[in-house]
Image (cartoon, coloured by chain):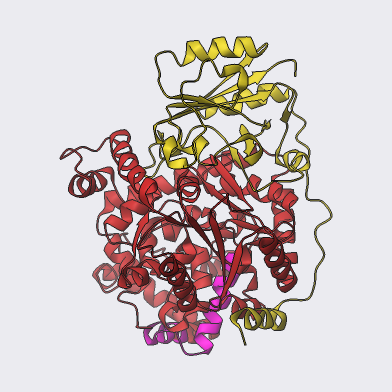
Amino acid sequence: MSKTVMEHADASEVFNRDEPYVNWHDETLWFVRQKRDKSSKQLPEWEELREAASGIKHYVLSHLDELLISFEQKAKENGVQVHWAANAAEHNEIVLGLLKRHKIDKMVKSKSMLTEECHMNEFLQKNGIEVIDTDLGERIVQLRNEPPSHIVLPAIHLKKKDIGDLFHEHLGTDAGATDPQYLTEAARQHLRDKFLTRRAALTGVNFAIAETGGFVVSTNEGNADMGAHLADIHIACMGFEKIIPKQEHLGVFLRLLARSATGQPITTYSSHFKKPREGQEMHIVIVDNGRSTQLGRKDFRNSLKCIRCGACMNTCPVYRRSGGHSYHNAVAGPIGSILAPNLDMTKNADLPFASTLCGSCSNVCPVKIDIHDQLYKWRQVLAKEGYVPKSKEIGIRAMSTVLAAPRFYQWSGRLGRTVMRAMPFMVNNGLNPWYKQRDMPEPPKESFRDWYVRNRKN
Amino acid sequence: MSSRDSILGHIRQNKPEATALPAVTTFASNFDNTEDKFREMLGAIYTEVIVVKNREELAQKAEELYKGIVNRATTIPALSAWADFSLNVSDPHELETVEIAILEAEFGVAENGAVWISDKYLPHRALPFITQNLAFVIPRNALVDNMHEAYVRLQDTLGWGCFIAGPSKTADIEQSLVIGAHGARSMVVFLLEGE
């Protein structure tokens, strides 16, 4: 894979040029985080639910092979065809093969982060297949030739004016119209026509149940169901970690998912697919694409517990102020930053550094993934294996020299304070990364250590 | 080696030591009044809950609520006189013009206002999604407190089934809530007494 165009820090800098916009983005996501808080506090058993979810997912990781085999067997008994893909390329070929066999060149798709991860749309387009994303947010970013910037809120980075302009160009809405109701209605009409005319529908999978061979797809818009129930062929694609042991465990996960994601007690639609309807073909593609490698990384395997609620993004001070695209990965934010290095260390070495390690992500995670610990641990791995950029390495080495020598540390502190007082321009300039988007603080007259030494004498 | 076998092989090699399932995975909600909670949750998602004494009253309410609307469909025999759209079609695409569907469903969940409907109650899976407006009829005593209880009740999901909580919605444009994304634009839940 090619080196990324822009690293997270550089992309964030671009994102931060428009201050009112960044503030808006920050506040919008924080609002979603607050809705999550309110909703979770309605349930006295919230923490126990998280514990149960984490425990079930740990059981899943330690019994994955058996659960997948059971799921496959049951699904086959239900009349569903099961496919296995070791990597993204194989996944894309399987989907293309199914469409070709049915001579289908147009497909509707509901939200699937896995197909983003596999870059399936681009691949299918190159092979003459038109793919229409039917989630409103996803359709918006698709029309803009952009990837989603958030796994739950794909167009969260856009203002309604951007969308009004876009729809004016593509859907013929009135110039300058920005009313969300009006724009959504236009998209409804536009996409209804696609639902009614496409013979194939692809959906993601939120949970696949080993016990029954069924799977659950959650949406608010109803687009997964509109697609699947009208199409001749339904293809559901899942990363293999989506498996859960029993149907009753859905009780735990569906109670956590929407509350963590948007603060809703449940999504509007929680669709339980098990058998194809009469005359329909149903396929499931089970994808590895690096997951079995991640499973073998003791420090990082817990990342596979993720149920893709996006809570860690909404709460992350870095995500809120840098935007999803700066992560250059299908899954952005804290969870994306611990999943991405597993996929490609060279390309994603910057991501575990896109964090303050404040730990808020771990605190809101409904399956209790130790996200900030993993971010920290990835930094060690990446540095050890030589993936950390030279500039960062030099900085860290200088820092460790200073911190390891107490006298040198005291002297540099004093020097720094003096310089900041006497020659503020030395630090208040564009060369100092700490000066970006903020003013440097007043330097204190003395360090805490000096104060302590002086006062203890008295 | 097939991809299946190689994936399973890698998993076997890399999976952590076996842990047991947690002892507790279900919780009780113990609402003071299950129906009040159900009503409150649905109210918050723009859904009216209407109690009807019997099927005659249901027919009467349906008449009042959806006056002047054409292409009315139902799965409830007591409403057959009210309906003017036959669900006896072979291709679900023909449901495209349905304006209102009043459908029998199985039960409701108080903690989130979701109603369970499945193949058992539907001639076409597409119906609750493609109709412009949707109403469910469930027995008044068919309410459970939370999702754990729901899955106890739901011993089998048949071929397909769905929890539906309120009308279709989206907030993808600047987080402004808009009702009526792709599915139903409005939703009513009738609680039918005495059955």
* A418 and A125: which is toward the camera: A125
Residue in view at x 65 percent, y 20 percent: B191
Query: On the image, which quarter does residue A318 sit in?
Result: bottom left
The percent position of residue A211, horizontal first and vertical second, equals 75, 58
Residue at screen point 35% across, 82% down: A3
Q: Where is residue B98 in the image (x, y as percent from the top left)?
A: 43, 30
Q: Which chain is yellow?
A: B
The answer to whether any part of residue A458 appears in the image is no
Residue pictured at 56% horizontal, 35% vertical: B165
Residue B59 against residue B128 in the figure, above or below: above
Quarter in which the C terminus of chain B is drawn? top right
Q: Where does the image place residue A136, in percent across and percent down from the top left?
A: 37, 47
Q: Which chain is red?
A: A
The verdict on residue A378 being magenta is yes
Rendered view: B33 above or below A264 = above
Vertical arrangement, residue A90 with respect to residue B83, above or below: below
Residue closer to the observer: A33 or A66: A66
Q: What stretch is highlighted in magenta?
A: A370-397
Residue A432 within the magenta-colored segment of the rendering: no
Q: Can residue A399 be seen in this view?
A: yes
